[in-house]
Amino acid sequence: MHRRLLPANYKWIALSITTIGAFMVSIDATVVILAIPDMLIELRSNLVILIWVVMAYIFASTVLLLSLGRVADIYGRVRLYNIGFAVFTVGSLLCGLSQTDFQLISSRVFQGVGGALMLVNAWAIVTESFPANERGTAMGINSLTFALGSVAGPLLGGFILSVASWRWIFLINLPIGIAGTYFSYRYLQEMSEAQPGERLDPVGILAFSACLFALLFALTQGATMGFTSPLILASLAVFVAALGFFIIWEEEYCCPALDLRLFKSREFNFAIVSATLQSLAVFAVQFLVVFYLQAVRGYSPLTAAFLLLPMPLGLAIAGPLSGRLADRIGARIPASLGLCIQAAGVFWLSTITPFTPYSFIVVGLALTGIGGGMFYSPNTSAAMSASPRGRLGVAAATLATLRNTGMVTSFALALAISAGTLPSAVVEQLFLGTATYLGTATMYAFVAGMETALHVSAFICLLAAGFSFVRGPRPASTAI
């Protein structure tokens, strides 16, 4: 291995470069939400089409994770990460220059491919660069940045829209992307070695991609089209059939896209399950609160996004501290405690009314953020440390895929529960961040629906805490 030839501070160089990439990838998943009304006017499009400006990026950056993780394990993680930075930057430029809605959606797909290349390799590069007894701290910073990016997206988007065209939401990525592409090419060094005889699994990759795309399509479109519509039922049928075929194929193929032996590790399994459930429970909370602040309390989209700041601040404070604690005592206690704190924060938020003071809401937001910060880094470190070095790309892809799937499902589930009693036009306005103040009856209906959705989220958080706790007491620092 090349580790002995690396400079003494290489691990911090690798962490810095991958952290910048993680922040860019996560922030672009949500930064466009407030810009869709302006895009509708300038591109002369319609809402049904432009929703895919948001979803195309999420789909591309999720569906491709597993296949690209396998490619990285074979051909080199640093090489693929560097290509991802370049693809993401070019995709951002194409988005900013788009003249039609279909050009913009296509450019977002291209941008999502670059995002997937960066995301799937970042955790693997950090895992290889840091010794096991420092990995929690490193993952704390990297995972924290990814979580902060999703929260910061609406804030950054609202600020840019207040001073410039929506195109600058994408063009602002260019200087950062160019610098990141250069630094990753110049300073990151390949530490992985391909195993002899390894090759790709195109059939498995295609089956998994079809399976995940069908599931994500059904979950995201079912809230508006109805889960009993023929198209949604057909999508769910494709998901079940493709998943069954994928599992059978992977068990028989010599070089599977997803090495099922990863799931022989108890620590890896429960880290994956906990991450998926946590993502399912919490991702939509920030959006529900933003919707509440806009449609119930009457704040502007940008003001509502700023009022959400206690959540990312809690993440920023707790993330590195919990990572350092996990390096000493293992992941089980800080990760499980973090999930319990998140459950308490989400339940606290479920008690708000149309007239609750903001000071009360701050407590729930802060608890939710602190709990998330305590969970992310120990759990990610535990999952990656429990994975064989030759399968770090696939391990990271599996974790990221299931986490992203949980995020998308969380949004669809929470929106379906909380807005189920609202007219479809109001639901669309809430999603876009353009809803004005709701009438009294509709306002109380939304708050009641939000309460139910948050109760479900709190319960799922506690369920995730249970899975996290039973992973076993082995300290993360003893992992490979």
Image (tube, helix red, strand yellow):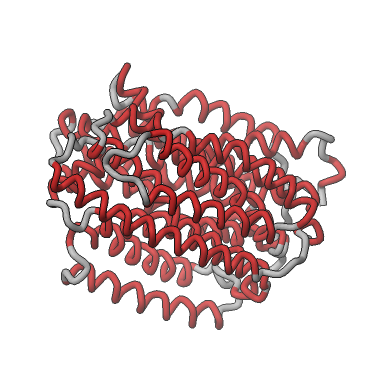
Task: Please provide percent x and percent y for residue 304.
Answer: 34, 32
| Left or right of residue 409, residue 81 in this image | right
In the rendered image of this protein, does residue 96 appear above or below residue 456? Answer: above
In the rendered image of this protein, does residue 97 appear above or below residue 4? Answer: above
Task: Please provide percent x and percent y for residue 8.
Answer: 84, 35
Task: Please provide percent x and percent y for residue 207.
Answer: 41, 71
Q: Nearer the viewer, residue 100 or 442?
A: 442
Q: Nearer the viewer, residue 335 or 4?
A: 335
Evaluate whether residue 86 shows in this view. Answer: no
| Left or right of residue 352, residue 250 in this image | right
In the rendered image of this protein, does residue 112 appear above or below residue 359? Answer: below
Evaluate whether residue 159 shows in this view. Answer: yes
Taking the spot 19% from the left edge, 37% from the top edge, the residue there is: 435
Taking the spot 17% from the left edge, 48% from the top edge, the residue there is: 48
Q: In which quarter of the image is residue 183?
A: top right
Task: Please provide percent x and percent y for residue 330.
Answer: 75, 57
Looking at the rendered image, the quarter that the C terminus falls into is bottom right
